[in-house]
Each structure stands twice: as structure tokens, then as C-alpha cells.
Amino acid sequence: MGIQLFRIRQVGPLTFATMIRSSPQIEQFVDRMAQHFPHRPTDGQGTLMYAVSRFVYSTQPRCTLMIRGYAGTGKTTSVGALVQTLRDLGQRPVLLAPTGRAAKVMQSYAGITASTIHRRIYRSRKSNDGMPAFGVAPNSLENTVFIVDEASMIGEGGGRSTGTTMQFRSLLDDLMEFVFSGQGCRLVLVGDDAQLPPVGEQESPALNEAKMRAAFGLTVATIRLTDVVRQEMDSGILYNAHNLRLNLERKDDTWPSFETQPFADMKRIHGNELQEVLEDAFHHYGEDQVALITRSNKRAQQFNQQIRHRILWREESLEAGDRLMVVRNNYHWLAQVENIQTTLLANGDGLEVTKVLKRFKRYGISFAEVEVKFADAPESPVFEVCINLSILESDLPQIPYAETQALEEAIGLDYVHLGSKTAIRKAVKADPCFQALQVKFGWAMTCHKAQGGQWPMVLIDPGYLTEDSIDLEWMRWLYTAFTRAQKELVLLNFADAFFKD
């Protein structure tokens, strides 16, 4: 396959082009990578291939390549071609993503196993007081390329716990520590900086080149894909997402206008049509292949209850077949499971209930003992957990810290006979009620929870909107929601003012 059009040398303000000259080795890598594209690469993808080849053969320390790409620009295709090329050359790339859902998506397009960042980089250990904690695992690999997708989701929180406190380290810090502790290892960060940043942050630090260079001493090159792949031009999802992206780049916060009529993959519906549409979608795709994205945890809770009662005909608070989403890291339950890669149930992990074993009430709170399995890993074993039903039925995203403290104190009264504060604290931390898993139902969710995942069909509920509600933050939210859909996108209860047709 000829690629003379793509022999581009300049890829950014700091590039690997300045670190290593072109050579037959680099040209061979580019030619081989081009062969793994299902279509003729775009100019942007050609530029990317040269950036990648120089990255692979660079001898610079702490070598990092950032690949930013709009929706529809062939970012995933490019990364898939990179993975296959590295394997052709006898290298074993390691694929990582912030959530289990994102790892599953990455695995589907790259063709090899992907893991969550948490499961790869953390290992359990004992803290100074004998309680379980997590530390960064040793990276025993050498000269390995780590490829991290959905890097916009990696924030400066959400990492490992520090001892037995409720404090957490930066996941970004821990990822850098792990990757570059391996001799000759290098890092590829892939993402779309138009998507939502991590919760509580104004931007995505992992896609900020200057910040990453200054904070971690990295040698960084950046490539941005902007050309929409020709094969994607007939997609209404990508057409309208592209227009949202342009609004964001222009900082235009006027009401966006969508086109649905020319496209088979987009439609708008009203609330009275929702049940029929969901019933048809569950029948056609399967209930685990459809997602409803909404603005708040309260609305997600309402939609989930409607789905359970009116479509799935489930009457109990929790039943076999229910799909759940972990909303707080948990280090307890998997530690008791044999032959499993990690002892961490991470925020965002999807679970499916296989059996409800027992319901009980204690300390004024309802609990359930259940058997579950990972929804995105069919090969994983079934394991038992205790679930806090109060948060499952609540509009809150997690149990407030004050309530966690109150529960800890109440449980501690059951162990006063142990005498010492250390023994009591250790018993409390091991108590199933204190360690009860915090989960939400997983059909309807906020956009932050959906980020990193993709579904054949996505429905978007904008919630109650006023003219003041439409700002750049809202459009970033909507762009992220749009780009979760693979085949069909349904706009639910959007006002007429949003549509040209």
C-alpha cells in the first residue's frame, strides 16, 4: 500500500521528529502500520503513523505520546493498527482504560486483552496497623508500550487508598509511577479533550501536554486527529457531534441545532413513546446493550425504577438479572475470591446479579447478600457480596461521609468486648455491613458514569432546561453523551428549538 502522501515530518510543538531522524526502520514501521488500516489512511492518520514510529524508536527518557482525536476521526482504528504493528514486530503492548466498560470497548477494537488501570497497577498489602491497603505494584516489564484509552477520564483523585482512611491518592500519579518504573517503558495516552473532564476538575490533566511534562518530567509529543473519516460522513450521530465540537472550539454557547431527518441513526421521541422504544431496543439489542444517559442521579434513579417495574416486571428491591454499577471503590469482597486478577471492585465496574441469597436490616439500614459477576467479563467467577440497599434506592450518588461515620460507630458498639481500639477498628473494617458494596442500577446513568463506554443504542434525556442552562459545560456534556452511541441515538424530550427539521 503506497503512502507517499503521508510522509509528514512536523507533528506538533515538541515532536519525536526532532529526536530521531527518518530511517528505513521508521519507514518500514509506517508501511506495516498502514497495512493494518481497513481503508486508505487520512492525512491526519498518516501524520500520526510517523509520530508513532518515532515514538517507538526514540531513546528519550519517559517517552510519552498523546493522541487526541475527535469522534469519527479514526482514533480507535489508528490505535488498533498500532497494536497490531507492535505485535508484528514481536512487542507486547499493554492496553489500559479507566473503567471496565472502557477496557471492554478497547479490547473489541484492538483485538487483544485490555484491563482497567486499577486492576493492572495496584496490589493489596498490609498497612502499618495490619489493615488491608493498596500499593502500586512493581512493573516487571521492560521496553513495553503502555496504551491508555479514554485518558480524559484520568484525574488527580480516584487512586489507591492511603491506609485505612477515606483519603485517596491521585490515579494519574500512581499510573505514572507504575509505567515508568519499568526499564525502557513508554506511554501512549489516547483521548478526546472535548469530553467531560474528571468529576470536580476543570480540565483533563492527562491530556494537558504542558502539565504532564512539568509534573512528571515526561518527553511528550502530541498528535491531534481532526479529519472525519470518509466512511463516517453518513452518520447523523457523528455529523451532529462534530457540530457540537465546533461550537465548543468557537466557545459558542448559543442553542445548538440538530439534524435528524436525513439520517437513519438518529431520531427524537417524547416521553409517552419511551416505554415502547425501550421494549423494542431491549428485544433487538439486549438490555445490556442499551443505555439511557441523563443529567442527574435523581433522574437516573427514576428512569431505572421505571425500567425495572414497567419493562422488566421486577417487583422486589433487587432481583436476579438486575444490572448494577459500582459507585465507590471497594477493597473487601474480591480479596476472598480465588483465581481472580484483582482484589479491587472499582468505581464504574458493571455487575450482574445472578442470585439474591438473603435480605436483612441492621443499624436501621437494609442490606442484601447476593451473588454477582462482572457484566463486562463473562469469564470471571461468580462471587458473593453484601449490598447496601439504601444507596441503591437513593437519589444520592454515594453514601455521605457523615452516614458512613455513623454506621462505623454503630457497628463498633457490637465489638466493644474486644477491648482495644485497634482490635475494635479492625473488626469494624472487616464487618460485611461496613464493607457493603455501594451500587446503582445500570440501565440509566449520568454522563460521567457512561463515559468510556459505548452501546449500540443510547437515549439522551436533557432534563429540565432553561435558556441559561445552555452553556459550554452543558455542550461538553452533550458531546460526550452523543459519542457513546454506536448505531442508534435517540433524543428524548428535546425541545423543538433544538431541531432544524
Image (spheres, grey):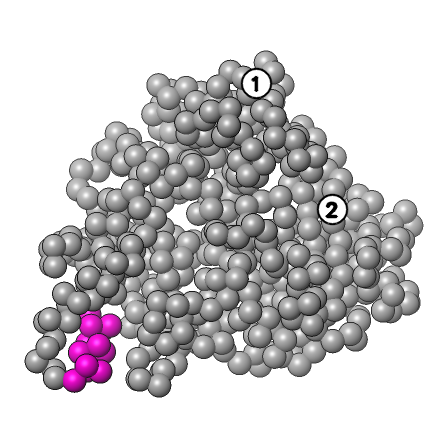
Instruction: State the SS at label 1.
Output: loop
Tell which circle, 1 or 2, labels the residue nearer the N-terminal end.
2
Residue 378 visible (yes or no): no
Q: Position of residue 392 (x, y in %)?
A: 26, 48
Q: Position of residue 283 (x, y in %)?
A: 38, 32
Q: Position of residue 493 (x, y in %)?
A: 43, 22
Mark 1 residue crowding within 10 angstroms, few (<14) / some (14–19) / many (20+): some
Residue linked to disc 2: 225
Q: Which mark is residue 499?
A: 1
For image coordinates 24% across by 33% down, the residue present is 309
Verify whether residue 38 appears in magenta. Answer: no
The amino acid beneath tag 1 is: Phe
**Is residue 382 toward the left or the right of residue 76 in the image?**
left
Which quadrant: the C terminus? top right
Q: Quadrant of residue 254?
A: top right
Q: Which of these two is toward me, 43 or 128?
A: 128
Residue 417 visible (yes or no): yes
**Residue range (magenta):** 420-432
Q: Which of these two is toward me, 150 or 13?
A: 13
Instruction: State the SS at label 2.
Output: strand
